[in-house]
């Protein structure tokens, strides 16, 4: 078996008396999409925030490519190849689509914010930004201001921006949320094409998308992983059916 890109061991997070993350173990392997599912309030977003370095765990450890990242702040984790998408702060609404991507490329290259305003004048940055936008079907929107994009276009752009940091693993927090059927299918196609290069931890309520995409699924209930396995194993697991999927494989 390949060594995991991301290995989580015994992670614990308390909010006062509430255990939001209860001794979680999780491995994400190279070339795989690992879905994290569970009912509302199960602790999925809290777990992602700890992996990204935005929230400090009360215990346990997180390793990226075999090296612990527990002491690293969020920006240093990005530099090591861990990126997350679909954060509200992800995009600059008053900048063009192209500049949002060019700025992410500049950050990857280690530029400080002082120099970011020249992003739109740099040919190399523009070229990489345009190639990435074309791959996501957004070439025609490069000059548009982000505030004018549709919800689906923003979701696609957030993915392009995260990819511009050249991550080895992406943490995706509900990429299908608010997308129509055609947009969801486009997102599924995009994520499937990406996974050979970028492993993913996918938090998603859309079970159709999860079962189409995931190589492995872990089920979180009250902060605890109650099952982990392939889509078929998870579908058949009696504890999962009782706690989450119900009798008809439907999401809660
Ligand atoms: N900052 C916080 N302070 C106190 N409690 C919190 C905080 N953040 C989350 N919680 C609680 O921790 C638990 C897990 O919340 P979390 O948002 O991680 O769940 P989730 O699985 O992502 O839910 P959803 O699917 O609805 O997004 C919930 O009971 C929530 O109320």
Image: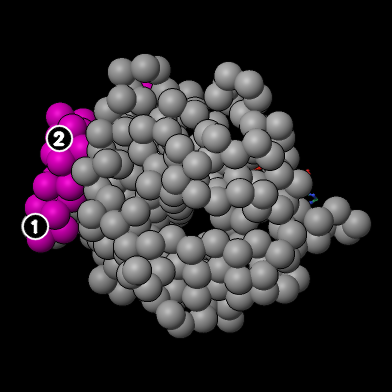
Q: Measured along the vertical axis of the image, is residue 73 above or below residue 196?
A: below
Near-viewer residue (143 or 132): 132
Quadrant where ligand 1 appears: top right
Mark 2, residue position: 139
Q: Residue at left 49%, top 28%?
A: 206
Magenta part of the chain: 124-151
**CB of residue at label 2: within 8 Å of ligand 1?**
no
Quadrant of residue 133 in the image? top left
Q: Secondary structure at mark 1?
A: helix
Q: Secondary structure at mark 2?
A: helix
**Where's residue 85, x and y in %?**
43, 48
**Where's residue 193, x and y in %?**
21, 43
**Where's residue 81, x and y in %?**
36, 68
**Where's residue 219, x and y in %?**
60, 45
Q: Measured along the vertical axis of the image, is residue 156 above or below residue 25?
A: above
Residue 130 among magenta residues: yes
Near-viewer residue (136 or 208): 208
| Residue 72 can be seen, yes or no | no
Quadrant of residue 95 in the image? top left
Q: Residues within 10 Å of mark 1 (few under 14, many from 20)?
A: few
Q: Residue at left 61%, top 71%?
A: 9
What secondary structure characterizes most of the magenta part? helix
Q: Residue furthest right?
A: 17
- Which quarter shows the C terminus? top right
Q: Are marks 2 and 1 in contact (CB under 8 Å)?
A: no
Q: Is residue 78 left or right of residue 26?
A: left
Q: Measured along the vertical axis of the image, is residue 137 above or below residue 120?
A: above
- Which quarter shows the N terminus? bottom left
Mark 1, residue position: 123
Q: Residue at left 36%, top 32%?
A: 212
Residue 207 among magenta residues: no
Q: Is residue 147 left or right of residue 145?
A: right
């Amino acid at each position: 078996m390949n060594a995991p890109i991301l290995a989580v061991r015994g992670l614990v997070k308390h909010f006062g008396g509430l255990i939001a993350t209860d001794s979680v173990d999780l491995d994400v392997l190279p070339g795989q999409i690992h879905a994290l599912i569970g009912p509302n309030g199960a602790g999925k977003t809290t777990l992602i925030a700890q992996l990204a370095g935005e929230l400090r765990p009360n215990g346990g450890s997180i390793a990226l490519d075999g090296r612990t990242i527990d002491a690293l702040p969020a920006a240093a984790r990005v530099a090591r190849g861990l990126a997350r998408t679909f954060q509200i702060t992800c995009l600059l609404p008053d900048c063009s689509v192209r500049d949002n991507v060019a700025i992410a490329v500049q950050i990857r290259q280690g530029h400080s914010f002082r120099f970011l305003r020249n992003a739109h004048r740099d040919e190399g940055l523009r070229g990489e930004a345009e190639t990435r936008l074309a791959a996501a079907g957004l070439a025609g929107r490069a000059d548009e201001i982000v505030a004018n994009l549709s919800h689906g276009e923003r979701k696609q752009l957030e993915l392009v921006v995260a990819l511009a940091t050249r991550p080895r693993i992406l943490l995706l927090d509900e990429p299908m949320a608010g997308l129509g059927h055609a947009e969801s299918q486009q997102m599924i196609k995009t994520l499937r094409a990406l996974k050979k290069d970028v492993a993913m931890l996918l938090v998603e309520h859309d079970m159709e998308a999860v079962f189409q995409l995931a190589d492995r699924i872990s089920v979180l209930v009250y902060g605890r992983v109650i099952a982990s396995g392939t889509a078929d194993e998870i579908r058949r697991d009696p504890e999962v059916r009782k706690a989450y999927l119900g009798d008809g494989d439907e999401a809660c």
